[in-house]
Image (spheres, rainbow, N blue to C red):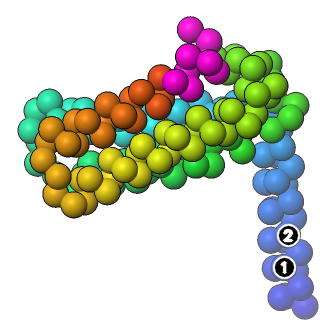
Amino acid sequence: MNKVMIVLATATVFAAGVAQAADPEAYVEYRKAAMGAVGGHMVAIATRMKTGVEVPDDTALHATAIAGILESFPAAFPEGTAGVGKTEAKDAIWSNMDDFKAKAMKGAEAATALAAAAESGADMSEIGAKVGDLGKACKGCHEDYKEK
């Protein structure tokens, strides 16, 4: 009997979490947090490059995190979340979802290339070029899909 109660309680908590996540405002908050995390990772990489701070595997770890966020990011824009809450997301995302997904994937690929370069022991000029590629990918998406 106790096992049944535990399973039912777990299912209830899980269902409540799913229902809560379906709230359009929750998607907006998630998107803000995810982009804040990407920004934080980019600042950490740039700070390391500018200051010469030596933290083993740091750039690869940050770049890998960025890639992971960007790969799944389009899922945070389901139908019904356009124009919800205070957001910088343009409505064009929903009318051009395939392009939005492609640009997010381009960013993920640039971040993965940066991580690979960092893991291979590339010199700072190569790392810098990969950071530049990632920045261009971010800018390419922001120009079309983020309010200024």
Q: Are marks 1 and 2 in contact (CB under 8 Å)?
A: yes
Residue under the image location 20 percent in, 42 percent down: 126
Residue 76 lies, in percent from the top left, at 71, 40
Examine the rendering and report whether any part of residue 77 can be seen.
Answer: no
Q: For numbered disc 2, what is the local secondary structure?
A: helix
Range of the magenta residues? Answer: 140-148
Residue 84 lies, in percent from the top left, at 79, 22
Q: Amino acid at mark 2?
A: Ala
Viewer-proximal residue among 147 and 125: 125
Quadrant (top left/top right/bottom left/bottom right) for the C terminus: top right
Residue under the image location 12 percent in, 47 percent down: 123
Numbered badge on residue 15: none
**In magenta segment, residue 56:** no
Q: Which residue does the numbered mark 1 point to in the structure image?
A: 7
Determine whether 57 is above or below 106 in the image. Answer: below
Q: For numbered disc 1, what is the local secondary structure?
A: helix
Q: Amino acid at mark 1?
A: Val
Q: Which residue does the numbered mark 2 point to in the structure image?
A: 11
Q: Around disc 2, counting alpha carbons within 10 Å, would you say few (fewer than 14), some (14 to 19), or many (20 or more)?
A: few
Quadrant (top left/top right/bottom left/bottom right) for the N terminus: bottom right
